[in-house]
């Protein structure tokens, strides 16, 4: 019996998580998987109810789960950068507490959606890549603060990495690449940053452990350009936290919509955190029009990486592919179907 904690969160989060649960339950029943679900609060909803973005009860439930499926956190109600408690703290705290140091974001444009991307069709041909973003170090977790100086104020954020932090995420990227096209691209800013020079040095050392996998290095500014000009050159891309945050959102343009892309946050333990890469989209919340496919695809990753059910994962992914091939769309992709209608379409194809 696998235990799945559901964290619907804010905005459209509850709607898309509900959709993914329906698909998970259907696929699990067909394949003989036994799942239990436990819904908990996180983000803005948790702040309103408990004063904390990550209540102790939520964290404990996640620590005892086999996997966690998250919707989205945040929204205008809590969008005060000076607030001491913010929804995003729940997500960051959960990643750190569970030791989830690597975020996987696959990007594979669907042929039926080529027109949804602003890029020319020929630039999307053959694109099938996966980003591996370091999650628990770097600028977002370094020492930060403000201090008064003569005539003003100074703010600082510190970008720090240890070789151990770099080694574990790069090694994960190489393991993935060894099962794919055997190529890793490591993104850094080694011409300027000392932390990037350590990153590059460590990546080279890890590469020696995987002689069948090719390693190349690219500077982040060059990679940002090549990601939209020659994206098919990439297989597995590994990078630090902030660079990965920016580049993975840029990569969403390849698929045509943020609503399509899943993600998995993994560590060395059993439990993983799975979520679509889109935000809480409060402007369309509770209207029944949110695209659930990114969350459904995240549920497929959950099956693959946390439940060891690769066949179930593949069936869910094929069902999503067939929905798109059959021309079924929500409004973000120019269609007219609602969240529940598109979810039923996926279930029918399962």
Image (tube, rainbow, N blue to C red):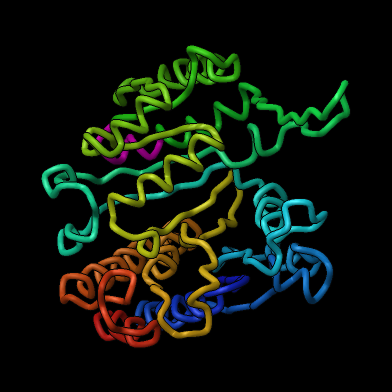
Q: Please tell me which residue lies in front, 183 or 116.
A: 116
Looking at this view, name the residue that lies furthest to the left.
122
**Direction from residue 108 to residue 61 in the image, left or right:** right
Task: In the displayed orientation, state which residue is furthest to the front.
Answer: 151
Residue 248, percent from left and from top: 42, 45
The residue at 36%/84% (across/down) is 338
Could you say where residue 149 lies in the image, as x and y percent from the top left? Answer: 87, 23
The x, y position of residue 102, in whole percent, is 53, 43
The quarter in which the C terminus is drawn is bottom left
Q: Does 236 sit above or below residue 96?
A: above
**Start-end of magenta stretch:** 175-182
Q: How many marks?
A: 0
In the image: residue 280, left or right of residue 298: right
- Side of 231 where 69 appears, left or right: right
Residue at x 53% of width, y 14% of height: 192
> Which of the image's four quarters has the N terminus?
bottom right
Q: Nearer the viewer, residue 329 or 22?
A: 329
Q: Quadrant of residue 156?
A: top right
Query: Is residue 69 something one can see in this rendering?
Result: no
When the figure is inspected, residue 62 is found, relative to residue 246, above or below; the finding is below
Can you tell which quarter of the image residue 289 is in? Answer: bottom left
Queried whether the magenta region covers residue 176, the answer comes back as yes
The residue at 26%/77% (across/down) is: 335
Q: Is residue 70 above or below residue 203?
A: below
Q: Is residue 1 above or below residue 192?
A: below
Residue 165 placement: quadrant: top right
Residue at 30% x, 64% y is 314
Q: Which residue is at the front of the view, 244 or 286?
A: 286
Q: Position of residue 128 (x, y in %)?
A: 25, 46
Q: Is residue 238 magenta?
A: no
Q: Tell me, yes or no, if residue 56 can be seen here.
A: yes
């Amino acid at each position: 019996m696998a235990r799945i904690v559901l964290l619907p969160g804010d905005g459209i989060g509850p709607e898309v998580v509900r959709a993914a649960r329906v698909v998970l339950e259907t696929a699990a029943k067909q394949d003989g998987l036994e799942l239990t679900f436990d819904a908990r609060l996180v983000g803005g909803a948790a702040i309103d109810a408990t004063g904390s973005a990550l209540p102790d009860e939520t964290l404990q439930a996640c620590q005892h789960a086999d996997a966690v499926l998250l919707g989205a956190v945040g929204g205008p109600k809590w969008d005060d950068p000076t607030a001491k408690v913010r929804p995003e703290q729940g997500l960051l705290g959960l990643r750190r507490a569970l030791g989830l140091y690597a975020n996987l974001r696959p990007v594979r444009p669907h042929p039926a959606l080529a027109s949804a991307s602003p890029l020319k069709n020929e630039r999307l041909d053959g694109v099938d890549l996966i980003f591996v973003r370091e999650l628990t170090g770097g600028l977002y977790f370094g020492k930060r603060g403000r201090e008064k100086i003569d005539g003003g104020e100074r703010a600082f954020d510190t970008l720090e990495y240890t070789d151990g932090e770099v080694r574990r995420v790069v090694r994960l990227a190489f393991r993935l690449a060894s099962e794919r096209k055997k190529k890793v691209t490591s993104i850094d800013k080694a011409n300027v940053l000392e932390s990037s020079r350590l990153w590059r040095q460590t990546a080279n050392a890890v590469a020696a452990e995987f002689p069948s996998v090719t390693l190349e290095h690219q500077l982040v500014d060059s990679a940002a350009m090549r990601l939209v000009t020659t994206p098919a050159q990439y297989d597995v891309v590994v990078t630090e936290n902030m660079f990965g945050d920016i580049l993975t959102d840029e990569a969403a343009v390849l698929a045509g919509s943020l609503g399509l892309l899943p993600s998995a946050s993994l560590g060395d333990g059993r439990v993983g955190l799975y979520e679509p890469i889109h935000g809480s989209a409060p402007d369309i919340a509770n209207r029944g029009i949110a695209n659930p496919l990114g969350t459904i695809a995240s549920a497929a990753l959950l099956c693959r990486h946390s439940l060891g059910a690769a066949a179930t994962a593949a069936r869910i992914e094929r069902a999503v592919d067939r929905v798109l091939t059959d021309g079924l769309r929500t409004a973000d992709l120019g269609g007219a179907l609602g969240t529940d209608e598109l979810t039923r379409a996926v279930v029918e194809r399962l």
